Image (spheres, rainbow, N blue to C red):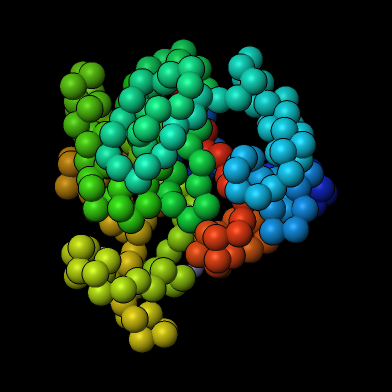
Amino acid sequence: MPPSASDSDSLLLWRPPAGSLPDGAWFGMTTRRGGHSQGPYASFNVGLGVGDEEAAVAANRAVLRAALGYPEKTPALLHQVHGDTLVRPTKTPVKADGFLLRGEDPWVAVATADCAPVAIVARDGKRGALLHAGWRGTVAGIAARAVKECAVEGTRARELRAVVGPCIHACCFPVGPEVARQFDPSLRRRHAGGQEAVDLPGAIRASLMEAGVPASRIHVAAECTACDAEHFFSHRRDQGVTGRHWAFLHLA
Ligand SMILES: [Zn+2]
């Protein structure tokens, strides 16, 4: 992500390139810029229960709500468990890692700090899904499951567009052999440290393609959350003491 020329104290949202999703679908993710949190949470942490001051998190969430204009106090959220379950938006978080969405649903968000936020939207912009996908959820097949659920709702895979947002890339994701062996050899890299590394966004793209989404309709963000400490929190880089981003999907 190129450094922004704007005031470094103002809210900065990551957005995918124009045209990567149908009109009417709003997909975006907070960066760490423009908030009230201090130390390892500086400055735009939206996660509670990660060690940050609650007042700072509340202030950050208020900034976000004012910027995006959703009427609820927070977007609908999930109790994320690194699985492959998708649910319709609920008022209180349930154990799942994806939302199945229809037009005019309330704003929803997944929380990330290295895991990938994934938006999947039908050509007409009226159906879609928002996923939280780390390596476990990816191995569990959450991306393919989302495509199947969209088919149940009446949208064929070839009519979907998808964006994989900023997440940890193979450059920063060395893993043990027990993790590496769960990925196809084409998605494994030799890391500088001698271990194998996993191409998480590549694995998600492969899963979407296997489920029938055309390669030309999948955009993978170039940003590695662990490489770009100026813009992103990274659970791996910051050894667990870090903030959380929210990635939103809203269908008009
Ligand atoms: Zn990296």
Residue 120 x %, y %: 35, 34
- The residue lying at 30 percent from left, 53 percent from top is 136
- The residue lying at 61 percent from left, 17 percent from top is 72
- Looking at the image, which is closer to me, 20 or 34? 34
Residue 92 x %, y %: 48, 21
The quarter of the picture where the N terminus appears is bottom right
Residue 76 x %, y %: 50, 24
Which quarter of the picture shows residue 103? top left
- Looking at the image, which is closer to me, 150 or 88? 88
- Decide if residue 209 is on the left or right side of residue 119: left
Does any portion of residue 166 appear in the rendered image? yes
- Looking at the image, which is closer to me, 192 or 55? 55
- Decide if residue 7 is on the left or right side of residue 126: right
In this rendering, the answer to whether 128 lies above or below 105 is: below
Residue 144 x %, y %: 22, 41
- The residue lying at 72 percent from left, 38 percent from top is 54
In this rendering, the answer to whether 38 lies above or below 197 is: above
Does any portion of residue 13 appear in the rendered image? no
In this rendering, the answer to whether 126 lies above or below 80 is: above
- Decide if residue 44 is on the left or right side of residue 89: right
- The residue lying at 22 percent from left, 45 percent from top is 141
